[in-house]
Every structure is written in C-alpha cells, then in structure tokens.
Image (cartoon, grey):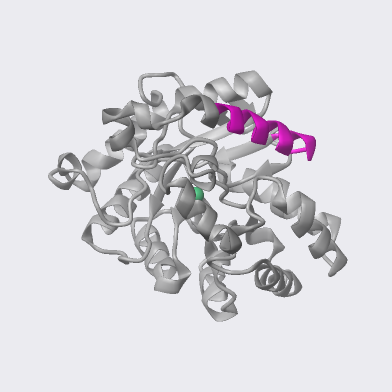
Amino acid sequence: MASVEGVQGPIEAEELGLTLAHEHFYSGDEAVAANWPHVRDHEREHELAVEAAKAVMEHGVKTVIEPTAMLLGRDVSKLRGLAEETGLQIVTCTGIYTYDHLPPFLVNRDEDFMAGLFVHDIENGIQGTDVKAAFVKCAADEPGVNERIEKVHRAAARASLQTGAPIMAHSRPASDTGPRQVEILLEEGVGPEKIQIAHTGDTDDLGYIEGLLEKGVWIGMDRYGLDIFLPTDKRNATVLALLEKGHAGRMILSQDFDIPIANGLDWFPPEFVEQMEPLAKDWSMTFLFESVIPALKEAGMSDEQLETMMVENPKRWLTG
Ligand SMILES: [Zn+2]
C-alpha cells in the first residue's frame, strides 16, 4: 500500500483520514529570526500551535499538510515536536516560497542544482533531521512568473520527476499566474495529477478555474476566511457551482491559516493585524468545520462530496 512521509515517518495512505491540506502552524521571516531571535516569541507560537492542533483534532482531522517552505520560516523540528505532543499527523514539504527574490546562492546556480536540494529533502531529510519532505512547494504572486519564479517552478518539476513527489504551487488568480505555472510544470513533463494549484479559490471566475481544471490539475479552494481576497459567500457559491459541474474529484478545501501571521507575531505587527481584522474576521484553523461545511451542506453538498474533497483528494494528490 502507498505511504506518505509525515514528520514522524511514513503514514499509510489509508491512515491519512480527514485532512486539512493547507495550514501553517509555524512561519516567519527566517532572515530576521536568524539574526534577531529576540523578536520572536517562540513560546507563544508553540502554545497557539498546540491549541490549534488540538482544536482541529476535535473536529476529526487526522492530518494537516503544512506547506511552509524555505523563506517562510520552515522548521521541521518544531513540526515534529508538535506532532509528538498532540498526536496530529503532519505532512510537510521542500521547496521555496518566494514571489520574486532569490538569495544570490540560488540566483547564481541553475535549476538542476536547485532541484538537487529539493531531492535531498525528499530522499535524505530536511534541515539535518531525518524528517522527509512529501511534496515540493513553489509560488507565484503579484510580480508574476518572472525569470526567478520560472526557475523555481522548473526545479520543482525536475525534483518531482526524479522522486515522484507531487507539487503544490501557490498562485494568484488576480495576476493570472495559474495557467503559466501549469504550463511550465507540464512542459517539464510532470503529470497533471501531481500538480496542485493552491489558492485557486481566491477567484469566482469560473472560466479561469475551468481553464485550469481542463488541464487535469488539482485546485486549492483553500483560503476560507481570507475575505480580503474573496468573501466566504462567494467562495461557497464557487465551490457549489463546481460541485454542480462534477468537479468534486479535483477540489481541495482548506484555510491557509497561519498562526504567527494571524496573531501579529511575525510578518505584521499586532496593530496592523488588528486594523486588518475586518478583512479576515472568520479566519481560523477550524472555520471550515464551524461555518463553511454546515453552509455548504445546507446548500446541497453531499457527505460523499465532502469526503472526496477532504479525505480522498489530498490522499490522491499526495500518493499520485
Ligand atoms: Zn500557505
């Protein structure tokens, strides 16, 4: 039977169970944290991570996919500690989270070198541990798919081809990044069943979304609660329309909740987070269960469709 690398070792595919496919327990600006560790409140971050892990487990979640890659403060020792302490299964990644910038070390080396780093994390382990990456993360956002972003995508594709690991690509529908990201990955020879275009649910443009679905990739309807990008009623209407059209088998539901960011512990100072609160007032790691799923069911989503999106699809994406 297929298995997936978790932070505590391999997990049988059938044991993944109810899965949140895109949430961040720990994240941060790693250059700042490395140079001025006193600005980080690791104790508070850990407290909140344990709280969130326990809260999702109470809703029956067995696995959280944690796509915190390089430049977003990846720390697999913390993730493993969290899994040990709470019993939650956590699956994590290799890859680079950048919208534009790359460190000179990587600007001056090619795609194949970068792919080799990703392969190392998948085959040997991450950050000197024996925790192995289960997938490769890459990203495109407002600056678009420029030369550096294309390089990361090609490296992700080559690592995927060498190892069989799937790819999660952060996208920005408002900048029309998804189609180009898919194009590059397919061009490199990655099968569409290995590709997840995260944050596709930030748009309600069905034409854009179906254009991606036609390529055979997975789509992340994975930012529930981030009204700043699209409010919940529009996210729900989009998911329901796609269910109606028979796309349950390609959608993945999650929230992209990020504990340090949501709590003003890293990217944004607390006063900024407070000011932005109305634009993400429902954002949490349990919002799906408390509000979204009941509303979708009320509007006609079946239990089978829910199971497909939150159990089967993450498993099928991870195991190919
Ligand atoms: Zn994310």
* Of residues 26 and 216, the one drawn nearer to the viewer in this rendering: 26
Can you give x and y, in whole percent of width and height, for residue 198 in the image?
51, 57
Residue 3 visible at all: no
Answer with left or right where residue 73 lies relative to residue 241: left
Query: Bounds of the magenta span?
Result: 46-62
* Of residues 42 and 1, the one drawn nearer to the viewer in this rendering: 42
Q: Residue at x 25, y 63 (%)?
A: 146
> With respect to residue 108, does 218 lie above or below?
below
* Of residues 161 and 152, the one drawn nearer to the viewer in this rendering: 152
Assess whether residue 47 is covered by the magenta stretch: yes
Classified by dominant secondary structure, the portion drawn in magenta counts as helix
Report which quarter residue 252 is drawn in. bottom right
Q: Residue at x 67, y 56 (%)?
A: 282
Q: Residue at x 47, y 51 (%)?
A: 271
Can you give x and y, in whole percent of width and height, for residue 99 in the image?
33, 56
Assess whether residue 248 is covered by the magenta stretch: no
